Image: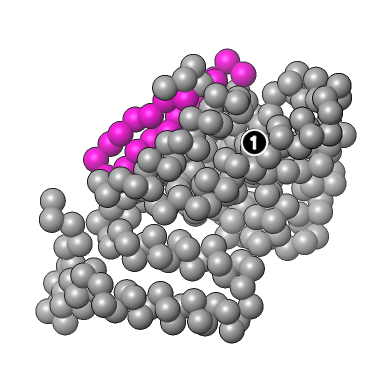
Amino acid sequence: MTQTFRKDVQEGHVVFWNTNSKYKNALTESYNLALIEALEEASADAAIGSVILAAEGDFFCSGGDLNFLKENNSLSEQERFDNINALHDVIKAIRTCTKPVICAVEGGAAGAGLSLMMACDMIVAAEQSKLILAYVNAGLVPDGGVTHSLRAALPRALVSKLAMLGEPISAQRLFELGAISEVTLKGKALEEAQKLAARIYAGPDKVIGSIKALLEAAETNGLDAQLDLECNTMAQALAGEEASIGVSAFLNKEAPKFRSS
């Protein structure tokens, strides 16, 4: 564990905490590195069905530390590239993790915190949460893949307004537009995320991992390429133990039991 990262293993899932609450859970190098390592470990752990990203305090993540970003003016171009790619490595680790990653948001997310949130497979946010692409207000452009993830989820006109004007948007509005999975009462985001985690854990682990991979590929594949990928993935699934369990349970009008315990 690090000073800004904590892991909490629960039955069927694991919660990764940002503990930098003094600074509204701004991202740190130690958090980024610890999160990447923990996501890799979760991918290989059959006892874990999903991952939840959460944060201590009343705000999910305020993004990058502006004091640190200010120092970037004196860095070489390569050093600036390296610092930006450190965030991008976190985003890639979330997207390539074989387990679904659920984000539990209290208070809100800003800048790279919104990038982190939007990289997740499911998002649960407390109803009062505000989300903001704060980059433009600091004379910066978005990073962390957020222009890609927001454009995949929202109309261009709205994303342009969010990115170019730095206007906040409510969790409720994003839920209505389909960019957030669940909106819940203040203080209940983690609880609701854990309910989703329990449902995931009851499902077929390998198949859910394959579905995540299909959805990831669908964002860049053309139809023919996606059809080929679905064909290959479905052919493998049909021969798997999870399909045998699921099909038998369906025919017998029973609830499938994909895990022995």
Dot 1: few (<14), some (14–19), or many (≥20) neighbours within 10 Å? some
Q: What residue is at 57 percent from the left and 15 percent from the top? A: 22
| Tag 1: amino acid | Ala
Please give left or right for residue 244 compared with residue 43 in the image: left
The answer to whether any part of residue 189 appears in the image is no
Q: Quadrant of the N terminus?
A: top left
Q: What residue is at 86 percent from the left and 24 percent from the top? A: 73
Please give left or right for residue 162 compared with residue 146 in the image: right
Residue 25 image point, x, y percent: 58, 25
Please give left or right for residue 162 compared with residue 200 in the image: right
Relative vertical location of residue 183 with respect to residue 62 in this rendering, above or below: below
The residue to which callout 1 is attached is: 86
Relative vertical location of residue 31 with respect to residue 36 in this rendering, above or below: above
Q: Main secondary structure of the magenta part?
A: strand
Q: What residue is at 59 percent from the left and 84 percent from the top? A: 224
Residue 183 image point, x, y percent: 50, 47
Relative vertical location of residue 85 with respect to residue 258 in this rendering, above or below: above
What's the magenta region? 5-23
Residue 53 image point, x, y percent: 46, 38
Total numbered badges shown on the rendered structure? 1
